[in-house]
Image (cartoon, rainbow, N blue to C red):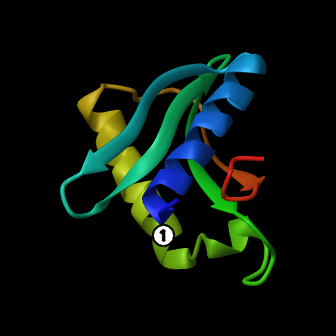
Amino acid sequence: MNNRAYGNLGEEAAVEYLDKRGYKIITRNFRVGRMGEIDIIGKEGDTLCFIEVKTRSNYSFGYPAQAVSNQKQATITRIAQIYMQNNRQYDVPVRFDIVELMMDRAGN
């Protein structure tokens, strides 16, 4: 399984996990040109959540969340601001989350 398919498998698992916990998924893979994308945008209650999904098969390179660098965090913040402006989401609570998944390439 290539990296893209593996990442998509992780995102599907993350959406299922979030859905079971009462999140309302608004959109997935919100992209702003070449700037980048946010994997999942959802709501938990009144809070708008911008969610990065990191899937790994082992800890060789550390925990999955460690792959979210300061630069990636800044990019996610800029994309979130653009999303909020485009959707007139001004006075809402906002949270940034990371969903870490450890699974083999078969999805187990």
Whole-percent x and y of residue 50?
54, 42
Q: Quadrant of residue 56?
A: bottom right
- Tell me which residue sits at (44%, 48%) in the image: 38
Where 44 falls versus 85 (above or below)?
above
Residue under numbered circle 1: 72
At label 1, the amino acid type is: Lys
Whole-percent x and y of residue 10?
62, 47
Where 20 falls versus 59 (above or below)?
above
Specify whether residue 51 is in view: no
Where 22 falls versus 94 (above or below)?
above
Whole-percent x and y of residue 9?
57, 44
Identify which residue, 19 or 42, lies in the foreground: 19
Relative side of 73 to 29, left or right: right
- Tell me which residue sits at (54%, 28%) in the image: 42
- Tell me which residue sits at (74%, 58%) in the image: 104
Q: Quadrant of residue 85?
A: top left
Specify whether residue 75 is in view: yes
